[in-house]
Image: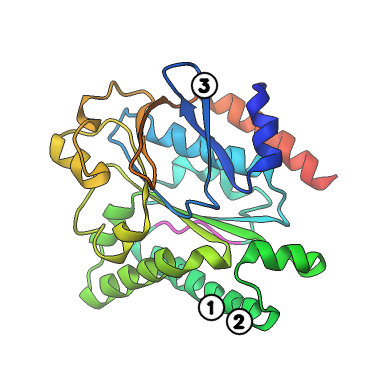
Amino acid sequence: MQHPSFSAAREELILGFCAGIDVTGRAVWVDLATMPHMLVAGTTGSGKTVFLRSLILTLLLNRSPSSLKLRLSSSKPMDFRVFAQTPQAADRSMAKDAQEAKLLADELVKEMERRYGILEDALCDNLAEYNKENPSRAEPYIVAVFDEYAEMASSFTEKHDRDAFDSAISRLAQKARAAGIHLVLCMQRPDANALKGAIKANVLHRFALKLPQNHDSRIILDEAGAETLLGQGDLLYKDANSRLYRLQVPLLENSTLKNCLQQASRQSEN
């Protein structure tokens, strides 16, 4: 947070966060708003949860509640409960099982369609253009984090529910960018059945922490390598142009996280 790149990114990027530090010591910043969605995979001990917490915290520090809404889904709510009461997330409870995740995905699709109506009436191509032209009626960006996504997708007892969930996520992956809705899909181990069709084709930014096998790496990165990572935040990032970066995720201790959230909460109140 003390690095000069932090304040620069706050000014230049819409939904910027530090993906990690490269081998030269340079902080690599990326913008979720332009991705517009991302895929994260990493086994236990890989640093996936720390990476996600760092991402979410940076967004909360850089975006006020009026300009960002956070939506959370995880079958392990303990990992993200610290964010649940932040002003950006407090208006919608965390989805904790497959049915709740499906309900959240359906809500996001409805919100996307509502925003498309607003953009069409205003003759705007995307949310950024609309907000610039209509500052008094600006709509917040929405970042939806679906942790344990593969587990959620495979735990539906009815096939039609699974298909409906897949369909909703696919529609969001295809169309939600213009509406300012951005997905962060996360899993411990990549599942080809959960990343089929429009989802994988439209989520081009991939973040792979340590994975168990060569096969897992190929599902997320389309190449081997993640199985050889060291764990504890050692990461391979593949962007939409298929450039591969070896990065180290910033360490974020729980005490630091809580202090930063308290600071952000005070700022939003003022």
State which quadrant residue 57 falls in. top right
Of tags 2 and 3, the one toward the viewer is 3
Please report the residue visible at 56 percent of the width from the left and 38 percent of the height from the top: 17
Q: Does the magenta stretch mainly form a helix, a strand or a loop?
A: loop
User: Quick check: 158 above or below 82?
Assistant: below
Q: Residue furthest top?
A: 24
Q: Determine contact: label 2, label 1, CB under 8 Å.
A: yes
Helix, strand or loop at label 1? It is helix
Q: Determine contact: label 3, label 1, CB under 8 Å.
A: no
Q: Residues within 10 Å of mark 1 (few under 14, many from 20)?
A: some
The image shows residue 144 at horizontal and vertical percentages of 50, 56
Dot 1 amino acid type: Glu
Dot 2 amino acid type: Gly
For residue 73, side relative to residue 179 (left or right): left
Helix, strand or loop at label 3? It is loop
* Spatial separation of the CA atoms under disc 2 and disc 3: 42 Å
State which quadrant residue 214 falls in. top left
Q: Which mark is residue 113?
A: 1
Q: Earlier in the sequence, mark 2 or mark 3?
A: 3
Of tags 3 and 1, the one toward the viewer is 3
Q: Quadrant of the N terminus?
A: top right
User: Quick check: 246 above or below 238?
Assistant: above
Helix, strand or loop at label 2? It is helix
**Residue 229 on the magenta segment:** no
The image shows residue 79 at horizontal and vertical percentages of 45, 40
Magenta part of the chain: 92-96
State which quadrant residue 246 falls in. top left
Q: Which residue is mark 3?
A: 26
Please report the residue visible at 34 percent of the width from the left and 49 percent of the height from the top: 148
* Spatial separation of the CA atoms under disc 2 and disc 1: 6 Å
Q: Which mark is residue 117?
A: 2
